[in-house]
Amino acid sequence: MKLTLSAGIGILLTAMFVLSAIFAPLIAPYPLDLTVGGVWDAPSAKNWLGTDTIGRDILSRLIYGGQITIFVALASSVIAFSLGSFFGFLAAVRGGWTDQILSRIVDLMMAIPSPIVALVLLSVLPLNLPVLILVIGVLDSTRVFRLARAVSMDIAVMDYVEAAKLRGEGQIWVIFREILPNALSPLVAEFGLRFIFAVLFISTLSFLGLGVQPPLADWGGMVKENKDGLIYGKSAALMPAAAIAALAISVNLVADWVLSRTTSLKGGRGA
Amino acid sequence: MPEIEKNLLDIQHLRIEATSYPPGEPPRDVVLVDDVSVSLKPGRVLGLIGESGAGKSTIGLSSMAYARGGARLAGGHIILNGRDIIHLTGGKLRSLRGKEVTYVAQSAAASFNPSKRLMDQVIETTLKNRLMPRPAAEKRARELFRKLGLPNPDSFGERYPHQVSGGQLQRAMTAMALCPKPDLVVFDEPTTALDVTTQIEVLAAIKEAIRDTGVAALYITHDLAVVAQVADDILVLRHGKKVEYGTTDQIINAPKQAYTQALVSVRSIDHEEKAEAPPVLSVAHVTARYNGTNFDVLKNVNVELPAGQTLAVVGESGSGKSTLARAITGLLPPTQGKITFAGRELSPALPGRKRDDLRELQMIYQMADTAMNPRQTVGQIIGRPIEFYFGLKGEAKRVRVQELLDQIEMGKGFADRYPAELSGGQKQRVCIARALAAKPKLIICDEVTSALDPLVADGILKLLLDLQRQENVAYLFITHDLATVRAIADRIAVMYRGQVVRYGSKTDVLTPPFDDYTDLLLSSVPEMRLGWPEEVLEHRKMESAGN
């Protein structure tokens, strides 16, 4: 498959974000919590993107914040995918009551807007990273369940799945060896999209004060800290916002490219 | 013979190309039709015959200067009524299609608009080309309905496509093609999708309509016995090239080329019926229905299959033959009756069966494409039952896989290939190897040769018979093709609407006196003999008059 220009840009930017997150301590010019200048200093040679509401270097906080944002989003997407696709496949393979119960639970969860569920849950549960990741992951898994179930419904009626059942294979073999490899391409493309939604979700929660808690920094939290600066014409709040947008767009470009390879769910399987 | 009459259609050195886009490789041009020349006089019928991919439909459509998606008319001339139409465009082409040349497609059910009445669709092109006013067109359509033997020809056009049967729909489409009084009609496999018992009626109707209207026709089919009934001349094609071109009589009775001879003599397998033996499978009083319906798809079915022999289950689509296979495999537990296999009574539902029951009862499917996981290599596909049932791993498994590949005559180098890299016949062979890997006592073959070209299907049948001799495996062979049954069966069960209407050894079943349904089924099988459909239908008419 040919690499398109937009996909190339997407891959380049995504790689940049990921690498700077991994090597944050090496790249960031200042520590996370050090006050290095005045309140909301404009960008300068010393502080490339300026300083924030209490004089910390925004570039350094962006780099460290990227670590948290990307990690939380990635971890919750992985949870969403493991849960969603396993139960989606199970519902498709077993059908009947299993399918009914799982699908109705998912319907129930999807009927309530997920930010509201998340807000309620997070205000009750202790606020730390594992809880945050789990809540986002479980809420996102409903969408993955729908997709995985729909894709594997098509595959579960194939003769080779019937042949495996007639051979006496167990459900685990059928799900992981017969269905998963054939459902992988649409799921991988969906993973990119779900990752972006997780980034937006964690940023929203942090902006509302229920996400990542200080002293840790994340992009949504940084927008919240600096939002008052917008009134005085300070650019500080725009930097993390731009980072969120750039990450979302670049991952989206990659996901689009993967998706275009699998436009026809059946055609992509041959090679 | 004086050559005064001018040719209606003259195809000269036709070349049709398409661009293929293999994954991971640069696109390249493939030649679909290479240097084919034919000519057709007014009122004559030319049969185009060949296997799938031979280019017969492509040539047929080129007579309307049309190339299907991706293909292009790359060279040569197509001279229709004295002018070259290969480079015509737009309006000129539109007035040519549906006026001078019309087309009858294979699947009438998919070609009719379900939301419009038949009459409006049948006369649509006639009106669009302003060939006659509406009342005249409707009158002509009704005449054609009558000629094609459709029931209630005066009110037939008022119906919607879903209200008539498949065979009637195919005849309605023939009426649509004949309505504008074209010079040439292209028939593209018009009877292939029909049951044999329907095919004979449609075939006779088409033949009569062609003769009465004096239209010229291109008749495309893969079945030599069918084309022999309608065509004056036959063009045999293979891989887009001409193999042989001659009169029907010459092609059928004195074919010159080796390939044509093979086509004519296909299904020449000799199979001696085996003697009675104790059964490996017996199905007793089995009745089954699908969940949520109040209709029995199998009604009190009793059959037995001796070890190492072949039981052919024959019937039309919807007769319940595949359902019988589902009941035996446990996918559809019967509501009544019992199934005994290798001396043990089988649990009705799949989850209750022992691993040995599963191992000794294998299945081969009609569509080899969907019967193999496209993400597994041939080695993995065949290797899995070896590992699953016998616990062989690593080198021992690899050796056994190669042994099986040798048995299905595929040799080395196939174990690492994916199904997409195999031909249709090879795919079906791999499916056979997967079934054999379990060392079964019984293999259920569900229409295993129906999707294959005749010569390839012949090879598969020969392989199955060889394997039966070597491994002493029994086959339950489900098919609608009676020629296949004759070639391989020891015992036959004829099914009709969920019941076994005739059952016994091959000789008994195929020897008169017949019951009504078996008689209908047997006499409908296309024969190469000229005048066969009329003879059979005449015979049937006399019988029903006598009753």
Image (cartoon, coloured by chain):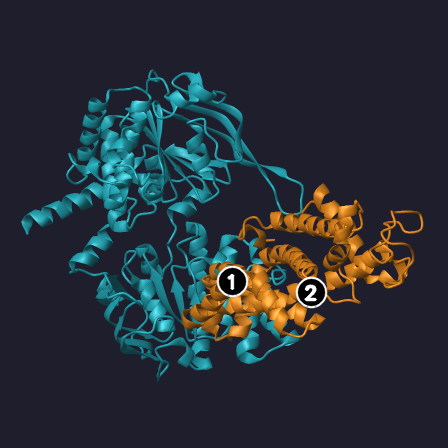
Q: Residue at x 25, y 63 (%)?
A: B494
Image label count? 2
Q: Is residue B379 left or right of residue B528?
A: right
Above or below, A141 against B543 in this view is below
Q: Is residue B112 left or right of residue B256?
A: left
Q: Residue furthest right?
A: A46
Name the quadrant of the N terminus of chain B.
top left
What's the residue type where badge 1 is placed? Ile
Q: Amino acid at mark 2?
A: Gly
Is residue B63 toward the left or the right of residue B497 in the image? right
Chain letter for the orange part: A
Q: Name the residue furthest left.
A: B546
From the viewer's side, name the closer residue of B390 and B20: B20
- Foreground residue, A245 or B47? A245
Residue A142, how many percent across, how many down? 54, 64
Q: Nearer the viewer, residue A136 or B356?
A: A136
- Say the numbered circle drawn on residue A211: 2
| Disc 1 crowd, CA 10 A, few/some/many (<14, 14-19, 20+) | few
Q: Answer yes or no: is residue A171 visible.
A: yes
Chain assignment, label 1: A
Q: Residues within 10 Å of mark 2 (few under 14, many from 20)?
A: many
Q: Which mark is residue A10?
A: none
Q: Residue at position x 32%, y 36% from top?
A: B249
- Report x, y in % for residue B261: 41, 45
Label 1 sits on a secondary structure element that is loop
Q: Secondary structure at mark 2?
A: loop
- State which quadrant residue B483 falls in: bottom left
**Residue identified by numbered label 1:** A112
Residue B378 appears in view: no
- The residue that appears at 45% across and 67% down in the rendered structure is A104
